[in-house]
Image (tube, helix red, strand yellow):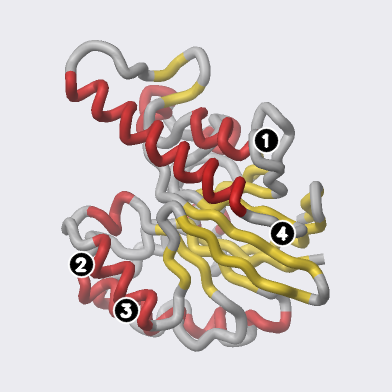
Amino acid sequence: MIRIAAVGDVHLGEDASGRMRPALEQLGECADVLLLAGDLTRHGTLSEARVVAEEFKDLPVPVVAVLGNHDYHSDRPEEITRLLGDAGLHVLEGGTATFEFGGRSLGVAGVKGFGGGFAGKCGSAFGEPEMKAFIGHTTGIADSLRAALDSLDTDVKVALTHYAPVPDTLRGEPPEIYPFLGSYLLGEAIDATGTTLAVHGHAHFGTEHGLTPGGVRVRNVAQPILRQAYTVYCVEPAMVEV
């Protein structure tokens, strides 16, 4: 069994130093790894990212993160990635991180993801160049996630995104904004690659539990949903227990 702690959408600002750290100090007693599902900052500034780095560095478990839309707002994602990486976090965008826990291997593949909508109610790469670019961006990111998951040869595979791969975990959000909260293409990548668990954030008014069409468990770990510092999932190959 591998114990996966996860949270997203912590939105730490310059005034948030020390806010989360007390809840994280004993993380090693209940979890083997911590996943951060994007929107780590409020506005994507380097000063905010430094607060994130201080909150999550030198924890008793490895930390794996993806960035979210807020982290891109100031157009500094590469610098934020380097800053967090220098603090020991594994920040993924089309990459993977692998670990061994108690004789079981865990592989995490991470991308930010993007919008576009879900089967039957989604955008297509047709018409104006702006629409083609929007859907093309989603398609490229989904392809990157699929390739990263495919590359993993581990007992457990986890897909870590900011945007949602299924509509299930968006219930509670206005249906009109579903196309801006995720894409079915992410779910297809997850279903095609033997993934055990998918973790995302972004949907503050959604719900925690969902499933891909292929039956992979999906968890929305946005902090406004969890209402706590993090939650923990106990994972075995092809199953999830909460």
Amino acid type at image mark 2: Thr
Mark in front: 2 vs 4: 4
Q: Position of residue 30 (x, y in %)?
A: 72, 76
Q: Earlier in the sequence, mark 2 or mark 4?
A: 2
Q: Which quadrant of the figure contains the C terminus?
A: bottom right
Please name the residue that numbered disc 3 is placed on. 51
Q: Nearer the viewer, residue 205 or 149?
A: 149
Q: Is residue 214 above or below residue 144?
A: above
Label disc, if present, on residue 45 of the rendered structure: 2
Q: Residues within 10 Å of mark 2 (few under 14, many from 20)?
A: many
Q: Secondary structure at mark 1?
A: strand
Amino acid type at image mark 4: Thr
Amino acid type at image mark 3: Val
Q: Position of residue 23 (x, y in %)?
A: 56, 80
Horizontal side of residue 171 vs 87, given as left or right: right
Label disc, if present, on residue 211 of the rendered structure: 1
Q: Earlier in the sequence, mark 4 or mark 1?
A: 4
Q: Secondary structure at mark 3?
A: helix
Q: CA distance from mark 2 to mark 4?
A: 35 Å
Q: Image point 29% across, 79% down: which residue?
A: 50
| Residue 189 in which image quadrant | top right
Label disc, if present, on residue 154 of the rendered structure: 4
Q: Residues within 10 Å of mark 1 (few under 14, many from 20)?
A: some
Q: Earlier in the sequence, mark 1 or mark 3?
A: 3
Mark in front: 4 vs 3: 4
Q: Earlier in the sequence, mark 3 or mark 2?
A: 2
Q: CA distance from mark 4 to mark 1?
A: 21 Å
Q: Nearer the viewer, residue 184 or 222?
A: 184
Q: Secondary structure at mark 4?
A: loop
Q: Image point 31% across, 64% down: which residue?
A: 41
